Image (spheres, rainbow, N blue to C red):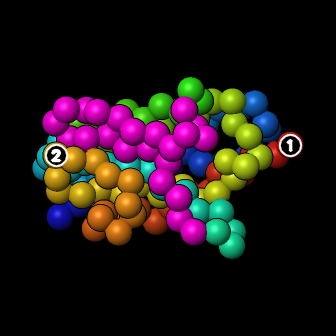
Amino acid sequence: QVQLVESGGGLVQAGGSLRLSCAASGRTFSSYSVAWFRQAPGKEREFVAAISSISGVRYYVESVKGRFTISRDNAKNTLYLQMNSLKPEDTAVYYCAARPSTVAVTDPGEYGFWGQGTQVTVSS
């Protein structure tokens, strides 16, 4: 099993940047594919980005391509999301998620481990 704790959220003006972190417990973090999702008020949880455990292949939702970068440091058991050129529509609670697989996917139902979320608010 793995436990996930997000941090790094906050209030930022449009055009600004934030870096989210997701600290994972356990010694097998490197074997998990991990992802970031977000959920805005009144909306369904949305896939943002994912990275596979072995190949390191990255996936992004179209709306964040070129602005967000997902990365992981297996030595530190930590997942990151660097968010640049933030827009008001990026405002949401951001969650990290993990699945014990070499394949990262975009369906939230395929992830069995979740953090508690961190709020990101982008003002216009």
Q: Secondary structure at mark 1?
A: loop
Task: Say left or right for 8 vs 53.
Answer: right
Task: Give the residue at x 46% y 40%.
Answer: 60
The image quadrant of residue 13 is top right
From the top left corner, tell me how far across and down residue 76 is, in percent. Answer: 26, 37
From the top left corner, tell me how far across and down residue 16 is, in percent. Answer: 72, 31
Q: Is residue 21 above or below residue 5?
A: above
What residue type is disc 1 on? Ser
- Residue in the foreground of this view, choosing between 105 and 24: 105
User: Residue lying furthest front in this view?
Assistant: 62
Query: Is label 1 in contact with label 2 (beta carbons under 8 Å)?
Result: no
Q: Which of labels 1 and 2 is toward the front?
A: 2
Q: Which mark is residue 102?
A: 2
Is residue 48 visible in this depiction of the protein?
A: yes
| Placement of the C terminus among the 4 image quadrants | top right
The image quadrant of residue 5 is bottom left
Q: Is residue 46 magenta?
A: yes
Identify residue for label 1.
Answer: 124
Task: Say left or right for 10 vs 2.
Answer: right
Q: Is residue 68 above or below residue 27?
A: above
The image quadrant of residue 3 is bottom left
Q: Which mark is residue 61?
A: none
Q: Secondary structure at mark 2?
A: loop
User: Residue lying furthest top in this view?
Assistant: 66
From the top left corner, tell me how far across and down residue 9 is, in percent. Answer: 60, 48
- Residue in the foreground of this view, choosing between 100 and 1: 100
Task: Give the residue at x 38% y 49%.
Answer: 35
Q: Is residue 40 magenta?
A: no
Is residue 23 visible in this depiction of the protein?
A: no
Please provide the residue range marked out in magenta.
44-65
What residue type is disc 2 on? Thr
